[in-house]
Image (tube, rainbow, N blue to C red):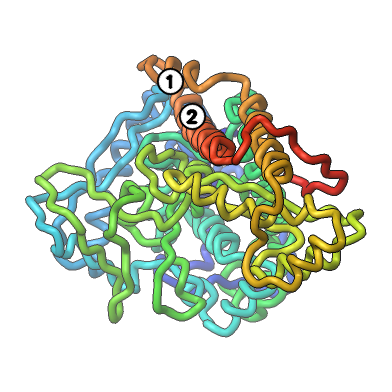
Amino acid sequence: MDVAHLLGPCVSSPFLSPSPRPFSGLPGLRIQRRRAPFRTTRRLNQCLACGADTLVAGSEGSSQALRCEKAAEAGDLKSWLHRHGLPPCKVVLKERHSHDGKHRPIHYVAASENLQAGDVAYLVPNSLVVTLDRVLGNETIAELLTTNKLSELACLALYLMYEKKQGKKSFWYPFIRELDRQRGRGQVAVESPLLWSESELAYLDGSHTRAEVLEREEGIKREYNELDTVWFMAGSLFKQYPFDIPTEAFPYEIFKQAFVAVQSCVVHLQNVSLARRFALVPLGPPLLAYKSNCKAMLTAVDDAVQLVVDRPYKAGEPIVVWCGPQPNSRLLLNYGFVDEDNPYDRIVIEASLNTEDPQYQEKRMVAQRNGKLAVQVFHVYVGREKEAISEMLPYLRLGYISDTAEMNSVISSQGPTCPLSPCMERAVLDQLAAYFEARLAAYPTTLSEDEAMLADCNLNPKKQVAVQLVKLEKKILHACLRAIFDFTDQLPDNTISPCPAPFAPHLKF
């Protein structure tokens, strides 16, 4: 399956009531799932037919599924929220068609009237917000779990999977149904690369983001293997969830899809306890669009979470919020979109001193004195490429020093390592230029080819966001090369040959 759904049987449990409750079950007790008796088979089949759009990928075209969908959505998310305490607000849910005809349109939050900067768009009571202290029923246990081996996202995903098992008996059914509808997609209707196929991941060839996707997936696997920790550590809190322990109740692929869905909509609240810092807020993401240059954000106030807009809106316009200072690689991984105007976009360069250098310890000491490590990560932000190169040069110069007198001079001086000779400076700049050229050569397409692909209005949406990402990465790399050439032109004699450097620093590719 390539969709992010919170899946589970839609047969309701007789042990649960349709009200908010802590996440709980019987510690250490394995309950075997019972087969539905024959007389319930017809009801079960009808239930599965109505849930086909969420339980079976790619079957949304059936007329029965569409009829069930219309009946189920007669009372939408916003109506449910108002029935359970949402005050009058200034937003409405609207639809945006999906690029994939098999998938339903996604919803988004729009202004229901003209708004001015500073207006409160809505205020969601805490009783309608899912946080770990509500899930686990105990703030101490919530903090213990998330400071041990499980992240907040894993706990929240597990909770919603258990709640999904209850079907309409769950208090959160309308919210979970909305998450199902969104299928872990952002507002451009593209899933996180965590749910892409191998052939789709090839769109990211040459980009370090592909390795980040694989690393994140390994992290999700580790979290899945620790899910049973919740079962045993939460003790008697599990008495209301009479199901198998997590790894027996939910296969890994289902957990990954739920994790990605939660990842796409979780809100990081400020100035709250650890157990409340990550929250699932109805009417929040992914119904809200993210924008890197926006200042509006969901904030905790008294007993609620509110959204104050930072700009004027006309009725019907989609409302945007700030997604935090995240580079485009993280935006794609978390939310399935790329922001062309992202001022926080960056690439990462890892440099390290040569451990075989006889002067390694002395150079390490000089680096630490200047706030750098033996293995140092440099962030190259868009628009500040020359500044980043200037920061890297003193660190790289250390690797080119071989003369003992020069090393002693550097040790006795204060501040970063200054240029010691034109040939050494040329060697450092040549190493950097070769590194950036190699990174550019690793992409299967050029910058101009990327721009030509993006001009195609029929481009596959997943490929479109991937090409957007690599195009913006290449622009940063080209800007770095231009900065290096500027520094080279400033040498007293830019035709001089670079000095040999048997122990040059390593730049991780």
**Residues tagged 2 and 1 counted as in contact (Cβ below 8 A):** yes
Q: Is residue 112 left or right of residue 408?
A: left
Q: Is residue 160 left or right of residue 25?
A: left
- Residue at label 2? 471
Give coordinates of residue 22: x percent, y percent: 50, 74
Residue 254 in sight in this render = yes
265, above or below 317, in the image: below
SS type, badge 1 = helix
Give coordinates of residue 236: x percent, y percent: 63, 81
Quarter of the C terminus within the rendering? top right
Q: Is residue 295 left or right of residue 11?
A: left
SS type, badge 2 = helix
**Residue kind at label 2, given as amino acid type:** Lys
Residue in front for this viewpoint, 175 or 243: 175
Residue placed at 64% from the left, 58% from the top? 418
Q: Is residue 152 left or right of residue 111?
A: right
**Dot 2: within a 10 Å radius of its alpha carbon, few (fewer than 14), some, or many (20 or more) residues?**
many
Residue 469 in sight in this render = no
362, above or below 97, in the image: below
Quarter of the N terminus within the rendering? top right
* Among numbered discs 2 and 1, the one appearing first in the sequence: 1
Residue in front for this viewpoint, 33 or 26: 26
**Dot 1: within a 10 Å radius of its alpha carbon, few (fewer than 14), some, or many (20 or more) residues?**
few
**Residue kind at label 1, given as amino acid type:** Glu
Please give the label number shown on residue 268.
none
Q: CA distance from mark 2 to mark 1?
A: 8 Å
Give coordinates of residue 17: x percent, y percent: 44, 68
Circle count: 2
Residue placed at 23% from the left, 67% from the top? 123
- Residue at label 1? 451
